[in-house]
Image (cartoon, rainbow, N blue to C red):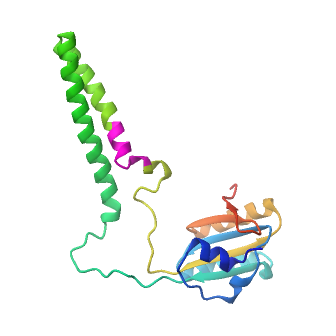
Amino acid sequence: MTTLAEYAHQHFPQHPTNSEDGRVPLAGHTVVAHVVGRQRGQRLEAAMRERLDAQRVTSLTVEPTTPTMKPEGGEDKEGIMDLPRKRVAGGAIALGVVVGIVAGIVTWLIADSPAAGIIIGVFAAIAGGWIGGVTSGGGRYAGNHAWEQQHAPDQAMVLVAVLLDDEHEANRVAAEMAPFEPEDVRILNSDGAWHSPNT
C-alpha cells in the first residue's frame, strides 16, 4: 500500500513535505486535489471536513524548493510564455515560404503557366507552414501545455485527500472540489496509480 507522502514524493521529487498526515495509507478510491497556495488548500480541506466524515479527510503540504539560479537582471520574465509561440510561428513562416517558392517555381516551369505556379505555390506554402509549425514545437499545443501552464515555484502545493472506497462517491467528491479551482484532481487507488475523475 502507498501513503499520501509516497505519492507526493513520487510526483514532486526533491520537494520537502511538512505533515505527519502524509503517512496515512491511500484507500481504494482516494480523491486528491493539488492546490497551489496554503490558504486555498486550507479552505478546501475545511470545506471537505464540513461536508464529509472528517476522519476521511487529510492533507499534506509540499514545500517549495530553494531556487538554484538567481536572476541577474534584464531577464524576460514572460519568456516561458512567449518563446514557444515565436518559435512555432518562425518555423511555420520559414518553411512555408521556402516550400511555397520552390513548388511555385517548379510548377511554373513544368506547366509553363504563371497562374498554375502561383496557385500551387500558395497551397504548398500553407502545407509547408503547417509542417514547419508542428516540427518547430507546435505539436505540444495538442496537450495544451505549450505556454499556458501554472508556474508557482515559490508557493506551497497542498494535497487535499479524501479516502473513499467507491468510484461513484469519489467522482461526486471530485465534482465538489472543482469550485475551489484546484490545479488538478485525481482519483488514486491504494497503490498510487491514478486516473482523472469522470466529472
Residue 136 is covered by the magenta coloring:
yes
Q: Nearer the viewer, residue 117 or 39?
A: 117
In the rendered view, tell whether residue 127 sits above or below residue 163: above
Count of numbered tags? 0
Span colored in magenta: 130-139
In the rendered view, tell whether residue 102 sits above or below residue 9: above
Which x, y percent locates residue 178? 63, 65
Which quarter of the picture shows residue 4? bottom right
Which quarter of the picture shows residue 180? bottom right
Query: Looking at the image, which residue is at 28% across and 45% down?
Result: 91
Which x, y percent locates residue 56? 78, 78
Which quarter of the picture shows residue 199? bottom right
Residue positioned most to the top: 112
Quarter of the image with the N terminus in it:
bottom right
Q: Nearer the viewer, residue 158 or 130?
A: 130
Query: Looking at the image, which residue is at 18% across and 11% down?
Result: 113
In the rendered view, tell whether residue 149 sits above or below residue 112: below
Q: Is residue 61 left or right of residue 164?
A: left
Which x, y percent locates residue 187? 70, 64
Magenta portion: prevailing SS class: helix
Query: Looking at the image, which residue is at 76% across and 78% down?
Result: 25
Which x, y percent locates residue 191? 74, 68
In the rendered view, tell whether residue 79 sits above or below residue 120: below
